[in-house]
Amino acid sequence: MLRALVTALGLAVSAAGAQPLRFADLDGWEADDHAAALAVFRETCDLMTAPDWAPLCRLAAEVTDARAFFEMFFQPVLTGAPPALFTGYYEPELQGSTVRTPRFAWPVYARPPEFDGKGIWHSREDIERRGLLRGRGLELAWLEDPVEVFFLQVQGSGRIRLQDGRVIRLGFAAKNNHPYRSIGAELVRRGAMDQHAVSAQGIKAWVRRNPAEGARLLRHNPSFVFFRKLADLSPEHGPIGAMGRSVTAMRSLAVDPEFVPLGAPVWLEKDGSAPLRRLMVAQDTGTAIKGAQRADIFYGSGAAAGDAAGRVKDSGRMIVLLPLDIALAKAGE
């Protein structure tokens, strides 16, 4: 049955790499807030129209016992080989302007009309150093720091607080489809930073201390992200994930959809200095998120979330909850 289910869902993992588990095997399962996880699962469940998921989503809208729902209709499945690699992401809140000023001189760009988001477009080097987009009216906002523009692209969304108090919400529009290269790994390779010291905060500090070399370092990553304004997104909602809906702090994950179906519940066992045992939902993706045991945890919005997310580089394991038996789900309708 597991082989057939994995095949039916189109997951890029062989049956030999998919190990069924019991809920009793999940460390900390009993102590989690399953109702909170169910609420997040419901946010995107209607988008899962495949036959294996649609009946479960109809049931999810009506159940009152969240833990019983997951235990009755789902099978915990360990795909790939732990240890996992967990990192964190967040929605930055940055000071900025809608016009260029001496303070705010670094642009955030909209997707150029001649690029439809498909295929490989110009590299970061072409765009930034050659000024490929300069003066074309594609600037959505201006920031005061080139490294913040870079990390805004890494996060894929942000809030720009203008000088008059208004806030612009920016979301992912497209990427140039060049491969993502880690500038943290490049700093380690150059001997400029020890592996244990690599973090978003450490990289930002290094670039600011070495502005000329830092600009060249940022261009080591040829991947470039374009944004769009999200005028109808309310302040209390998180940024828009890959499923087209807002993600939820500490309940949404970015995953590799080749291995984890978008919208699926995922049990997370993160180790490290701040261990986490929690049922989350795969609602986002990321350029650097590749593999069955790889996930990015959404930590929320603002500076505190950024500090927390930037320090996460932990091992552990992640277990996907897949539909147990579609016949059982249909019987409960």
Image: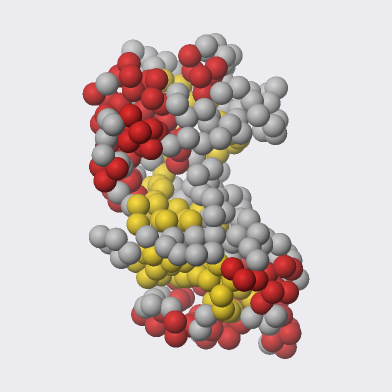
Q: How many marks?
A: 0
Indicate the position of residue 321 as horizontal and vertical percent values: 56, 73
Please state the horizontal and vertical placement of residue 56, each as a whole percent of the image.
66, 76
**Residue at x 55%, y 17% (from the top left corner):** 126
From the viewer's perspective, is 126 left or right of 57?
A: left
* Viewer-side residue, 109 vs 200: 200
Q: Position of residue 196 (x, y in %)?
A: 26, 46
Whole-percent x, y for residue 110 in the image: 57, 27
> Residue at 65% of width from left, 66% of height from top?
14
Task: Name the quarter where the C terminus is drawn.
Answer: bottom right
Relative to 53, 148 lies left or right: left
Q: In the rendered view, how is the structure colored?
A: secondary structure
Taking the image as drawn, is residue 333 in sight? no
Image height of 163 relative to 159, above or below? above
* Front residue of this view, candidates 195 and 243: 195
Q: Is residue 177 above or below residue 249?
A: above
Quick one: quadrant of the N terminus?
bottom right
Q: Is residue 60 above or below residue 130?
A: below
Q: Residue at x 73, y 85 (%)?
A: 327
